[in-house]
Amino acid sequence: MNIHFHGAAQTVTGSQHLLEINGYKLLLECGLFQGRRSDTYERNRHFHFDPKDLDAVLLSHAHIDHSGNLPHLVKDGYEGPIYATKATAHLVNLMLMDSGHIHESDAAYLNKKRARHGEPPVEPLYTQVDAAHVAQFTVGVPYEEEFEIVPGVTARFVEAGHILGSAAVVLDIEEKGRSYRLWFSGDIGRRDMPLLRDPVLPSNSDYLLMECTYGDKAHRDPQLAFDEFREVVIKTTNRGGKVIIPAFAVGRTQELVYCLHQMLDSGDIPRIPVFVDSPLAVNATDIFRAHPEVFDEETLEFMRNDKHRAALGFDTLTYTRSVEESKAINKLQGPAVIISASGMAETGRILHHLRNHIENPLNTVLIVSWQAPHTLGRRLAERQEKIRIFGEEYRRRAEVATIGGLSAHAGQEMLIEYATAVKDQVQKIFLVHGEERGAKPLMQKLKEAGISEVYFPEPHTFFAI
């Protein structure tokens, strides 16, 4: 077997790993590379292999850095199956349609500027129509069900605990008289997170391909994040203000809704209105509801005892789809919680809510995830006093609170536990989906634990195993 590392190699996006086994070609993931605009367009347009030569694609989960270039793969001639868990197969089509819309909008905006300078227009990487074509190739498979991909290769999806439908990909391989197992982690989640089951540790694996995003640090206890969230809601509500939360539409929004439901049911917070104002988040939540098989036992028990028999629905919760419903929220008087996309406050309806509430000292803007440099979310997290929204300057009088500990990625301790679960059998470990600052400390820790064959592959290199 040859493993070619064409994406998420010494970086955290664009996951693409090409396997050559028994004369067949299998692609693990087909993610978008995300970074500076000048780099991303060309990098995502050109594959380092011919899509028409692929025999199958296996997808660990629906995040765009793992699935977002599937429409371009199909556009370039791929016609084989795209295997994923049932929940991921359901969710990825929604995510790709949204991504296609973004690519179209970005191209339209850029072409207006190019036209003013007499430059030719650019084509979007792919469109919503291109994204829609992916669905015909997507095959949903239940967790833990074995299936043959190509002769000599049997696959199985096991729980990764990262987002809805996320999985590690287990490949049992018969090749040239050898039998061995390759375990691909996808993105590894954390224990004791809201809604989802804990990640399954690898077993009986000869080769381990695993992420190392946070290989350099541990995460805080999720319970501390829950407690801080509750205190922010109570404090803001007591002074009559609103809590405005920029949140990613898939994963983080649903975690926050579930936490608020728990707080309301236990009487920890008053019965205030809660709004989820993001069409993508609303649609993603519908998919969560359609797949209760992914929920952990704690969530299922909560649903059995809850009067609504639901984790993501309660009396004071409103999911808004239309623009008119969104605008009406800003006329509401009194305390409320408003969760809206985007997670870094760069686009979408959250900008309107911030514009309407940022100058009121009764309100709180709650930052619940890492914010990239040069984004509005980062400027808010830094508590800058003057904020520009839609080109206009506002004085930030609202309080800003930040909460750590909600990351959906495993921290260093969990990554070490994951790798050492196969310490006595594994021959080589390949670290992907991470930068050097995450990989190097993790490599050192694994060597201290007695695992010496740990590699951090450079982009477009390959290993023969």
Image (spheres, rainbow, N blue to C red):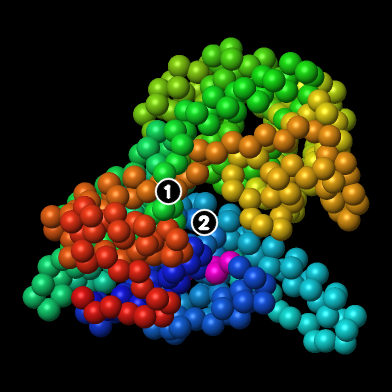
Task: Please name the residue shown 30% across and 50% down the image.
Answer: 416
Give the spatial CA distance, label 1 vs label 2.
22 Å
The residue that appears at 75% across and 66% down in the rendered structure is 105
The image shows residue 274, relative to residue 219, as above or below, that is above
Q: Does the rendering let one see residue 127?
A: no
The residue sitting at 83% across, 29% down in the picture is 361
Residue 427 quadrant: bottom left
Q: In the rendering, at what x and y percent does residue 160 appear? A: 37, 48
Q: Is residue 204 above or below residue 242?
A: below
Of residues 160 and 454, the one drawn nearer to the viewer in this rendering: 454
Residue 240 included in the magenta stretch of the image: no
Report helix, strand or loop for mark 1: loop
Q: Residues within 10 Å of mark 2 (few under 14, many from 20)?
A: many
Question: In the drawing, what numbered circle is on residue 449?
Answer: none
Give the residue type that dot 1 points to.
Answer: Lys
Tell me the amino acid under the disc marked 2.
His
Highlighted range, magenta: 30-34
Horizontal side of 131 relative to 428 (left or right) equals: right
Magenta residues: mostly which secondary structure?
loop
Residue 219 position in % (x across, y down): 45, 41
Between residue 348 and residue 434, name the one nearer to us: 434
- Callout 1: few (<14), some (14-19), or many (20+) C-alpha neighbours within 10 Å? some
**For residue 63, which numbered disc appears in the image?**
2
Please state, as top left, top right, bottom left or bottom right, where the C terminus lies in the image: bottom left
Give the mark, 1 or 2, whose residue is nearer the N terminus.
2
Q: Would residue 152 be found to the left or right of residue 240 on screen?
A: left
The residue wearing badge 1 is: 217
